[in-house]
Image (cartoon, rainbow, N blue to C red):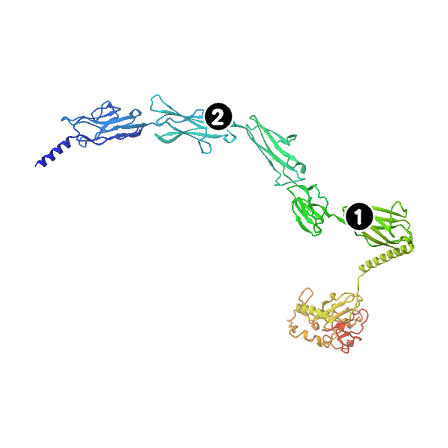
Amino acid sequence: MWVLWTLIGLAVVCRCEQKFAIEPQDQTTIVGSRVTLPCRVLGKVGKLQWTKDDFGLGQHRHLPGFDRYTMIGSDDEGDYSLEIFPVMLDDDGQYQCQVGPGPNGEPGVRSRFAQLTVYTPPEPPRIVQGESLLTTEDREIELECISLGGKPPAEITWIDGLGNVLKDNIENIVDSMPDKRRYNSRSILKLIPKKEHHNTTFVCQAQNQAERTYRSAKLRLQVKYAPKVTVSVIDGSTRLMEGMDVRLKCSADANPPDVTYRWYINERLVETDLVTELHLVNVTRAQHDSIIKCEVHNAVGKSEESETLDISYGPRFRKRPHSVQADQGAMITLTCDLDGNPQPDIVWFHEPTDRVVGTSGNLSLVVTPETTGRYYCKASVIGFPEIGAEATVYMKGKPSIISHRTQYGVPGDNVRIECTAYAVPPPSKVVWSHHGEEIYNDANKEYSVLEDPLSEGIKSTMIIRESKQDHFGVYNCTVINAYGADHLEITLKPQKTFPLLLILAGVLGGIVVIIIITMVIILCQRKVKKPPVNTGFIANEQSDVEKQCKESDRSSNISDIKMELRTGSSVSNVHCELDYGGGGSETGSESVVTRIGVPLAGPVPIDHRYSNRFSSSDYPEPVFPPKNDGQNNNGYVPYVDYSRDYNPPPPPVTSSPPQVDPRFSAAYGNPYLRSVGPNLPPPPPLTPAPPPYSARNGLLPGQRPQQYITAAQPQGVKRASLATHV
């Protein structure tokens, strides 16, 4: 029982104690918005009020005197939250919910302080310099952007015409306003205008936490700048060659655009009528690396741009290689110094071995017997002719005489004896002697010695005036230099002479013979050669003719083939001739025609040597269609039938019939086309060709020839032919 009363007492005590279920918290809001500061109390028995910065707002829920303040909620729930609408900047401060002591002595309670922060957006930014600014290149300017009345202070950002955020050379300043609640923000952009900034729009953006949307201001920058100059070659060639004409163009971009041009070559003013172009005619290597400058002026200032000429030209020697004399084992250097653009390609050749020994301007080598000789330096530049020079490497040593051991002279005439020696270094002395006695120029007037220096030695010539018999014999030539000596015994022999008259006669006779031979050759070339008629062919020539005639027969409907070999022509002039019933007679020339084919005089035996070359399958019997008389086939018919196609012309109407030789008929000489009658003469007998026979006509001695010669015919009749039947 005691426990029950204890619990009831505790419940009464707890119910009578005042405490907060919900206390207000710090909040941030924006001017014009609605804000609620929560406050809920359990066991409320005292009076409740809200305070702002420790100033009481009242105990009634409508809070008279504060139209924008209201305590919302219900007493049953113990909810006394404070609502402010619309929020003003003055509402910024500390708020507290307080409950006074109860009537029975219950203690009062106070909530924690809640800070209400009120933000206000700044005014739209503006640029102090306005919407446009005209300035000059390379002169520093300051662009100032201002944003007023923001809480917190506005953040200002600069953006250039390309959308890039500028972060350098910017100064930000914040000033507090008199109400101590708002702030003014300033941002200063320091800028050195360039040509690229001309007609560029700069943007100033401002914002704070009260308004997340940027507000902006714009300024268009106008920049006056000196000309921006470019110089270029406009002849379309990527490579300037020596001898070309070069055109250069000067382009300038300037503000203001009124400009003047000046051209300079290596700082020398060029007078030209053209303003924006410069013409150079026939450029040379002397103008290589010349600096072409274009200078342009306007009201702001001047600018210039230059172009260096890169002219390609062929190689040229600055220093040619020189021959060198050195001892064996010495190190030497041959120099080939060249000028060219681009740098010439250099190749050294060792001529005795014809091999490449170097590719640079200097060639170093050790002097040995293998490395001596001529060296050739070749230089080339693409697009230009090659040039070259040579030098010789000599190895020093004693002289070496290279003259002939036997020399000749004409007795009574002045005789010359030559002694040529290879000597490096050059000989210091050449000594001549005869019969053991040294020969001097001034000691004996019969002799005189001439010395001709050579690049590789010396040539000494001894002259004997009005030589006599005792002057002929052995002479000794000794050549001496610093490295030793060499000697040679030269035998002088008398030379037989011929009388001058015989010599002249021989020369003139030779000239006459040459002229005659030349005329004969010219006449022979103009004359047409006619070889004699040959009655037979060798086997291979006959075989070639047979093949030609056989091919012609296969491609033709005419079966009667004749091969003609005309007198005065070569074997290659043999051709196949078609016989149209004897109508194709020769002209009135006197040449003899050799026919190879089917004879008109009837069948003849075929040589057994050719019997295996043809068969009945090669030339089958043709089948002729019926002929349509009167059909015009351009003078030809599709088949030949001599017995019915030949229609002789009717005889002229005369008092007496003409006497016509029947042998002119197409049927003459062919027994198959001839009709036996009293008016036709018998065919002439066939007579063999006279012996002898040889392998040239394809027959062996004792064999019967397959050649027949027709009987002689009267003049005017078709000429007899030598027919060879295959």
Label 1 belongs to which residue?
Answer: 480
Q: Where is residue 184? Give x, y as percent.
A: 38, 24
Q: In which quarter of the image is residue 389?
A: top right
Label 2 belongs to which residue?
Answer: 141
Question: Could you tell me if residue 22 is visible in this image?
Answer: yes
Q: Is residue 234 above or below residue 508?
A: above
Q: Where is residue 140? Give x, y as percent.
A: 49, 26
Q: What element carries label 1?
A: strand
Residue 349: numbered disc: none
Residue closest to the eye, 18 or 647: 18
Disc 2 packing (10 Å; few <14; some 14–19; many ≥20): some
In this rendering, position of residue 644 left or right of residue 440 = left
The reply to whether dot 2 and dot 1 touch (C-beta < 8 Å) is: no
Q: How many labels does the image show?
A: 2
Q: Quadrant of residue 666?
A: bottom right
Query: Looking at the picture, which amino acid does disc 2 mark?
Result: Ile
